[in-house]
Image: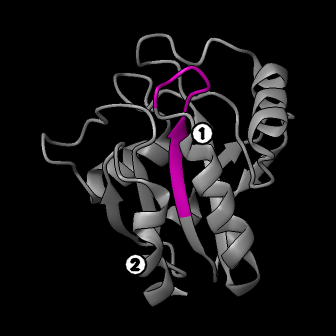
Amino acid sequence: MNFHNLEATKLNGEKIPMSNYAGKTIIVVNTASKCGLTPQFEGLENLYKKYQDKGLVILGFPCNQFAGQEPGNSKEIGEFCQVNYGVTFPMFAKVNVNGDNTDPIFQYLTSEKPGFFGKGIKWNFTKFIVDKNGNAVKRFSPTTKPEKMESTILKML
């Protein structure tokens, strides 16, 4: 099993196979619009704009499991990301990243790259890097700013 065997649903309801991103370096991040870390959208978008032509893609997965910080529906989430941060990277439908209903993408990522306290995700804006072959290679904490990931990304592009 690898990342490319999975699929996800975009905010508009379209199902996307992760194999569409084969050959690209991928950042997967669980997001929230009402979180103290929400300004990381800006850093993520900057990385995306800077390196998308070199093979970087960022995939955002809204999650409402942490203090109810993503209460919106898909339309509201999309509008918030666009209006407030100019997000152009793909955003997907709201998912669970912990518990019995964990999305398969996050089941895979957390089993491959457990965190300091185990497999569970501690908070919004946990970031994973997946290589061009669909292997999870690195996990970054919620408080790691996107700019701090740049050297790792450059090595993988």
Name the element at disc 2.
Answer: helix
Residue position for label 1: 61
The label on residue 107 is none
Relative horizontal placement of residue 52, taking residue 135 as reference (left or right) = right
Residue displayed at 42% across by 58% down: 128
Q: Nearer the viewer, residue 130 or 35?
A: 35
The answer to whether residue 155 is visible is yes
Residue displayed at 28% across by 32% down: 122
Q: Which stretch appears magenta? A: 27-36
For the residue carrying disc 1, how many other residues have a C-alpha within 10 Å: few (<14), some (14-19), or many (20+)? Answer: many
Relative horizontal placement of residue 139, taking residue 78 as reference (left or right) = left
The answer to whether residue 1 is visible is no
Q: Which image quarter: residue 85?
A: top right
Q: Which image quarter: residue 60?
A: top right
Kind of residue at badge 1: Phe
Counting residues from the start of the chain, the first of labels 1 and 2 encountered is: 1
Residue 2 in magenta stretch: no
Q: Which x, y percent locates residue 134?
A: 50, 72
Kind of residue at badge 2: Thr
Residue displayed at 75% across by 26% down: 77
**Which quadrant, please, contains the N terminus?**
bottom left
Name the element at disc 1.
Answer: strand
Instruction: Establish if 99 lies above or below 20.
Output: above
Residue position for label 2: 152
Q: Which x, y percent locates residue 153?
A: 48, 78
For the residue carrying disc 2, how many other residues have a C-alpha within 10 Å: few (<14), some (14-19), or many (20+)? Answer: few
Q: Which x, y percent locates residue 36?
A: 46, 27
Count of marks overlaid on the render: 2
- What colouring does the structure picture have? one colour
Q: Nearer the viewer, residue 144 or 157?
A: 144
